[in-house]
Amino acid sequence: MNQAFAYIYDDFVSQRRYERDLARMETELATRGISGYVARLAMFRQSREIVSNLARGGVKNVVLVGNDATLAQAISFLPDLDVTVGYIPLGPPTVFANLLGIPVGIAAVETLAGRLVEVLDVGKCDQQYFFTEMVIPSTTAQLEVEGAYRVHPIENGAIAIRNTGIQVENGKVCANPKDGLLEAVIQTAPGEKKKKNFWAKKGLSETQIKFRNGRILSDKPIEVFLDGRPVRGQVFEISIVPKKLHMIMGRNRKI
Amino acid sequence: MPSTVMVHGSETNTVIAHGVKVEGDLSSQGGVVIEGEVVGTLQCAGLLTVGPEAKINANINAQEAVISGAVDGNMTVIKRLELKSTAKITGDITAEVISVDNGAIISGRMSIGNKVTASQKPQAMPKKEARSSGTTGFEV
């Protein structure tokens, strides 16, 4: 066993249909000399404690085995630990895996063994980190940008604060997690006039602003989603933390 | 409101779309496209493009500008200012070069042809009553 590696299994991988994949993965890890401690991801606080203890014990690589939800849950606290993060996606959804260039299933072990480490920015909302985006689905909440100005949808609109985009447009990811900036995207329904004018034809339907820190201000409690995790509140402090996350990525990475 | 800070958009434009309102001091190191509403001040180190549906109630300082919408405020443009036929400017204009399409409306003083420097900020907008009594305002 390689004491520098720890594997965090999501609960769902104990299902019978993942038995074979898991066994093959463990054999492959042992063959490559990178098998390590195994822990299971359950409650959020438990997970944090388990991983913190492993890191204190000398583990340098924490590998999440599961799906995007597994990674999203762990990413909320992993950047504070002195570890490199790996990911073996075994089941859907695997959008993050695609972004990181990590193949699904046993092929991910080869990516892990390759240990191509990139240092990425992460977003921070109050005390929680997010890797891809913070989303407010329908709101009139205001985004205060770097203390200088406030921007908000006049009627209802969706606000996304992106570190890196889940969406890939024309082969390019829509926000760069290495530029030290967050990108705010506000989507509003186009008005009747807009539908007819030439601006609409140019596809200018989204507000886009790049910034380093800001606040979301709402006059009533709202629910926001950090990498899909729901968080409730009225005021949210948001910022970019540059070069915070050491991540093992594949050669076909899109970021 | 705290002092102005820069928005970091070197190549990618800052876009304020229709249905979105900005209040405060918006400043960008790159190009800016405004299609929504802006109240406050607007500084743009690149090309400022104001769409026909846009409503701007702000003093503007830009490197270059193409205006198709309504601007209520003084404008200082270091290089070229282009006013499209749907433009409606209420305020004083300072620019090195100007081009005005048929139908554009300007209500205010114009100073064109002199070298404009980046430090030359637009003067605070006078009260509307005072401006209407001025002698150099004209419409095109």
Image (cartoon, coloured by chain):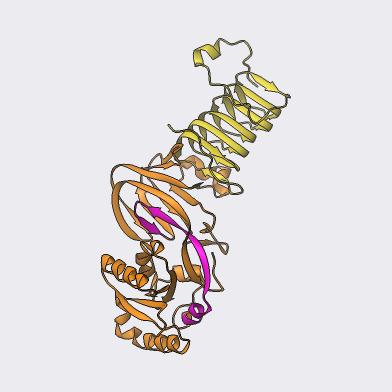
Which range is magenta? A109-130
**Residue A117 colored in magenta in the image:** yes
Q: Which hue belongs to chain B?
A: yellow
Between B9 and A29, the residue placed more toward the observer is: A29
For the N terminus of chain A, the image quarter is: bottom left
Left or right position of B49 against A145: right
Is residue A183 in the magenta section?
no
Q: Residue at x 42, y 57 (%)?
A: A133
Q: Is residue A36 left or right of residue A41?
A: right
Q: Is residue A54 above or below residue A224?
A: below
Dividing the picture into quadrants, the one containing residue A16 is bottom left
Residue A71 x/y as whole percent? 39, 68
Side (left or right) of B61 relative to A105: right
Residue A175, relative to residue B79: is it above or below? below
Give the camera-side residue of B101 and A96.
Answer: A96
Asked whether B66 or A121 is in front, the reply is A121
Chain shown orange: that is A
Could you tell me which quadrant the C terminus of chain A lies in?
bottom right
Q: Position of residue B90 (x, y in %)?
A: 56, 22
Where's residue A198, x and y in %? 58, 44
Q: Is residue A193 left or right of residue B79?
A: left
Residue at point 41%, 89% (across, down): A27
Q: Give the residue displayed 61% in from the left and 48% down from the top.
A: B11
Q: Is residue A22 above or below residue A183?
A: below
